[in-house]
Image (spheres, grey):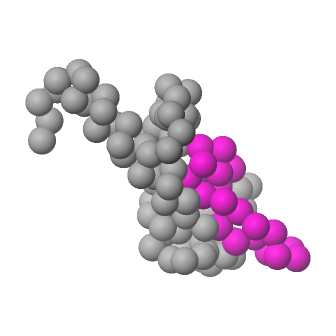
Amino acid sequence: MAEFTQRELMTITKALADPRRFEILQNIAGNSCMACSDLRVQFPIAAATLSHHLKELETAGLIATERRGKFVDATFQPKAWKQYLNELKRVMVAGKCGVE
């Protein structure tokens, strides 16, 4: 497994800091593939706002998007998520935060 950089850690952390974006990620992760049109039904937000959230999640490596004609499908990227969680554990142990 490649080394997880500080930049990757911060990019994912920033992406997840938005509660709506985290909620969108949870919905995508709960399905094998999620159409953006389905996300628009679940989240009554402007298409541009949803697009921005998806772009942030994709930039962080947490999702991948694939264009299917005029539709876009989003899929969760578990490898990035696992690397992120492992890095958080490493940071906590190194910092001796005492969090259990």
- Quarter where residue 91 is shown: top left
- Quarter where residue 41 is shown: bottom right
Look at 42% across and 52% down and name the residue there: 82
Look at 25% across and 23% down and name the residue there: 94
Tell me, yes or no, whether the highlighted magenta stretch contains residue 65: yes
Looking at the rendered structure, the number of numbered marks drawn on it comes to: 0
Image coords of residue 10 (percent x, y): 50, 30
Image coords of residue 84 (percent x, y): 43, 43
Residue 44 seen anywhere in this rendered image of the structure: no
36 displayed left or right of 12: right
Viewer-closest of 48 and 1: 1
Look at 34% across and 37% down and name the residue there: 88
Image coords of residue 20 (percent x, y): 49, 54
In the picture, the quarter occupied by the C terminus is: top left
Residue found farthest to the right: 69
Above/below status of 2 relative to 23: above
Image coords of residue 11 (percent x, y): 55, 35
Tell me, yes or no, whether the highlighted magenta stretch contains residue 43: no
Range of magenta residues: 52-74
Above/below status of 14 relative to 7: below
- Quarter where residue 71 is shown: bottom right
Residue found farthest to the front: 1
Look at 46% across and 52% down and name the residue there: 81
